[in-house]
Image (cartoon, grey):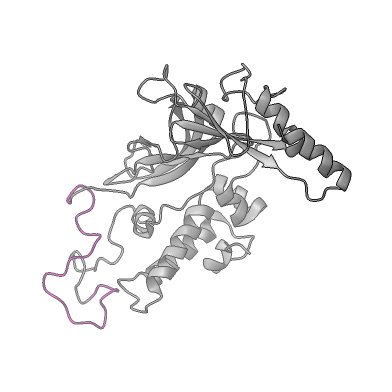
Amino acid sequence: MGQDYYAVLELGRDATAADIKKAYRKLALKNHPLKCKEPWAPRRFRELAEAYDVLSDPMKKGIYDKFGEEGLKGGIPLEFGGENPWTAGYVFHNNPDKVFREFFGGDNPFAGRCGGAGGCCCDPFFRGFPPKRGLILPFRGLRGRGAMKQDPPIVRDLHLSLEDLFYGCTRKIKISRRVMNEDGQTSTVRDKILTIDVQPGWKQGTRITFEKEGDQGPNIIPADITFVVQEKLHPRFKRANDNLIYVATIPLAEVKSQAQGTRSQPPRSSPGSSKPLSLRCSPQYCKMVPGEGMPLLQDPRRKGDLLIYFNIRFPQKLTPEKKKLLKNALLP
């Protein structure tokens, strides 16, 4: 069962936007690791941040209310077709302090009433504790008085077929991110389309980075968004670096005719070729076809090789008559 964000914020399903903000304010201050010294405080603080990040965004909240955490994080089917029939899944940026800072506008919510930056006797966070000289809270230095820090990178998978990596293609991916308004203090969630031009010959693990396309906020540098190529399984070919591997399964009864002639319906030489291949085959034989593999990234006009392995399918049972016929067919 998926995580219940409403339960995390101690709310019911009918909670309003104001209820969600009020609950997060109360629980985040109560469970902040600087205030709560219990060992579970960091985990609880992170859960509160993720729950608020989802429920405070109308789009993410709508998907969560209808499809739950599985639909939110795994993606949901689009109403209309296209190159990618599924939406991109939600990934929490795993930075609860970022959510906390943005909620309080970059101010130190623990600042005391006697004009200090925190750590004084009237600071509600330090009430009951003696003052500590030189104590610096992580909220100090905000609003331009401290060094700006970039959010951790956001990494997502980009699933591509073997044909996509053979020919090259263009992928357009919609992201939702927070963008600062003109007042410099508040933000709005807006959509943006990122375009990826897939080059022929790209391999599994290729990384494409869009710099500073993450959420914007006061006194922070937006995170980089990185897409990592994941190659989909192909029903016929397997890739090995720049080469392609094809396994041809042949019944034992055809071995003699295949060894002496050509296969009646040989496979296409590669995803990008329509010409058949004339192949001589024998048990445990591998045929290498030069230049019919994947395009080389450095020079797409050149290609790797195609390796065809023959898998001889032996029958499970043979009658005496069939044994005699097979013996006559295989012996010279």
Look at the image and say whether residue 138 sits in the magenta stretch.
yes
Left or right, residue 47 beside residue 249: left
Query: Where does the N terminus fall, quadrant-wise?
Result: bottom right
Left or right, residue 267 beside residue 99: right
Residue 253, given in percent of the width and then of the height, sits at 77, 36
Q: Which of 284 and 176 is in front in this view?
A: 284
The magenta span reads: 122-146
Is residue 120 in view from this perspective? yes
Q: Which residue is drawn at 69% across and 24% down?
A: 263
Residue 54 higher or lower than 201, as above or below: below
Q: Main secondary structure of the magenta part?
A: loop
Q: Residue furthest front?
A: 332
Residue 183, given in percent of the width and then of the height, sits at 33, 39
**Total numbered labels placed on residues in the image:** 0
Left or right, residue 209 beside residue 313: left
Q: Which of 152 and 293 is in front in this view?
A: 293
